[in-house]
Image (spheres, coloured by chain):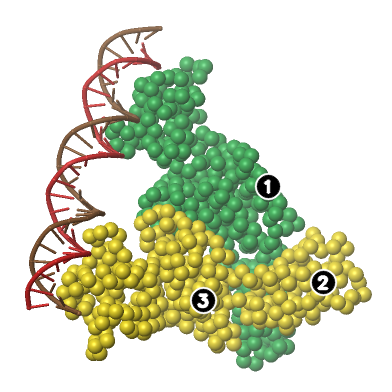
Chain colours: A yellow, B green, C red, D brown
Amino acid sequence: MTTSDERTSEPTHPGDGGLDSRKAAILNAVVNEYIGSALPVGSQHVVDAPGVSVSSATVRSDMAALERDGYLAQPHTSAGRIPTDKGYRFFVDQLGGPGPLDPGGRQQVRQFFDHAHGEIEEMLERTSGLLADLTDCTAMVVGPSHESAAVRSVQLVGLGHRLALVVVVLADGAVQKQSIELPEDADEAVVSEAGGRLAAHALGSPLAQVAPVAAPSAVPVVDTVVASGVAALRSLGEADGHDQLFVGGSSRMAAAFDAVDTVRSVLTILEQQLVVVSLLRDILDTGLTVAIGTEHGVEPLASCAIVVMPVSVDGIKAGTIGLLGPTRMNYPLALAAARVVGDRLGERLGESAR
Amino acid sequence: MTTSDERTSEPTHPGDGGLDSRKAAILNAVVNEYIGSALPVGSQHVVDAPGVSVSSATVRSDMAALERDGYLAQPHTSAGRIPTDKGYRFFVDQLGGPGPLDPGGRQQVRQFFDHAHGEIEEMLERTSGLLADLTDCTAMVVGPSHESAAVRSVQLVGLGHRLALVVVVLADGAVQKQSIELPEDADEAVVSEAGGRLAAHALGSPLAQVAPVAAPSAVPVVDTVVASGVAALRSLGEADGHDQLFVGGSSRMAAAFDAVDTVRSVLTILEQQLVVVSLLRDILDTGLTVAIGTEHGVEPLASCAIVVMPVSVDGIKAGTIGLLGPTRMNYPLALAAARVVGDRLGERLGESAR
DNA sequence: TGTTGGCACTCCATCCTAGTGAGTGCTTAC
DNA sequence: GTAAGCACTCACTAGGATGGAGTGCCAACA
């Protein structure tokens, strides 16, 4: 605004993504208005926006330039402009990061965590509902991974009829189970003996690192059972790759789009836990906080944007929060809500762990 | 067809719900056609249906009678007819019960259960997917209730920092957990001692029937911990009222309706596990297998029908299957699929239990 | 009396035809 | 570079016209 550079129409400010300050203001105004109304935005609607003190004619010429540069698009000639994915990208980058949450939302979050109780799973489930309420988006919450959690306890419980249950408690409080088949000649004593050996063997190391048992015992049947138990533990360790996913507010997708087809394809994706979890991980891995349109590469979600936020406990990653909405979602709100809820969730998980 | 009674236009056959055989045939034809096409059915489309060997004019007059009696409705004058909820009700009652599943479906079910493995929860989850695939409906699977299952094992695992986990294994293989807070002065030994007492106390009775401990031990701290443990067990027993629910194929609802609003309100219901579980229970309690339209009393599902099928193991109720679709869902298919899958699931659950 | 063919009628769906207005691009003047 | 004016575009809407699927009614018939 003060330097002459900023009035140049050519891309000059790398920091602004190649847009002079007025173009940036116009783009922001268009995005803001479109997020609210879902209607193409004309030059007239923009003239009163902050940072745009020029006539509609000038706005038009700037908009034409923004369209040439790929930030805006027209549904058809003589219609207003709609932001492209690139336009949203600029808008989001320019936000810099999550702003503060509105007081109402903060209040809701505080109340939620004040009254949150029960086991982790239930809390994560309800957190997804909270996020959906706050943002009007579909919320995804990925639970903490148990990959590195050490085994705190192993128990072998006979269920009768040649069936036993391996029950594992991990250091982070997670409980996992896996049923194993027993040999014909395994009685109570054998199960008990094998359980003891299994516990002694596995205690202290993460599930995936439980090694096969080398030293044979006096009773061969016990060895067989212990071997099954170890196999069960290892398979549990592998299955941990599939982190738990909690999806809340999937109905919001139906409100966001008016094309039933879009709703259907988005819901189909949401039903595939594996896809969703790895999608969130991929986005985080590429260093993004927001993935807009095709940036994440999942074709059926091309008209969606995803906000991801890692949840960490004492600086260690302990889960992920994701918000899914249309590309014209309310990014400032979504970012703020994800940040606040993520932080509070991390604290909360920390409290139970320590 | 052979007695003169059946040719009377007045309601004469209580067994037929007050419809002579031709009217019944016409109604069935209309329902069948409407299920397939979702378009109002005219008299011309019905003349070739089995049991209707009369002209379209006669069909028309019968249709008018069916409309007077509330079985059919017209979207507007000069349009074809659409079944009312009462019409569907007649259609379903007249089916008598689930027919056989088509060979393709049977094959799919067989394959599924041949390859089914893993823990119950995973199997139930995948079963909901199978049902959705088979019927193109949204499938709901309610897991076995653990109310009456005896406690097979109780364990108290310290998690450090005044926190311990009560881990319970029930006779049916279910594992439940609840964290409890420990008093300041509870060390490893106390936890271990309390765990032993808790186990001795609770073993063999269902969770809800675990009584408070009367006899005090030598160490007061141990008593405190045991008391917390018992409280935890009892609260787990109460929470069992909320049976586990697995919903599969919720995206199918989006395909079934073209009004986005309907989709949204149905999804909103599906998000409320408690509502769904008690809805299914209510329908079963009223002795129904199919609830059509407003029969179940949940207003947002007025344009839906629900097929329920109890899953039993050795004659004892062990879960519920539900199928949710539009009132013009394919009832024969849904009933057949629910029956077959329910039976096989029951067998399967029985195998693991014995 | 139940059934049938004929006939007039209804009304949705489709197509076309302006008319309207929001919005644009261009050109000229400052 | 900005502003003002102007012609133009094109979705959206409303108002007929048309066609066809479907109905209800009536008179004739077995």
Q: Which mark is residue B110?
A: 1
Q: Position of residue A165 (x, y in %)?
A: 74, 67
Q: Which mark is residue A286?
A: 3
Please state the chain letter of the residue tagged with numbered disc 1 in the rendered image. B
Please state the chain letter of the residue tagged with numbered disc 3 in the rendered image. A
Q: Which mark is residue B23?
A: none
Amino acid at pointer 1: Arg
Res B203 visible: no
Q: Nearer the viewer, mark 2 or mark 1?
A: 1
Name the residue that disc number 2 marks: A226
Which of A14/B284 is in front?
A14
Q: Residue at x 68, y 47 (%)?
A: B110
Q: Residue at x 54, y 58 (%)?
A: B247
A194 vs B296, left or right, is right
Quick check: do tags 1 and 3 share a chain? no
Which of A272/A82 is in front?
A82
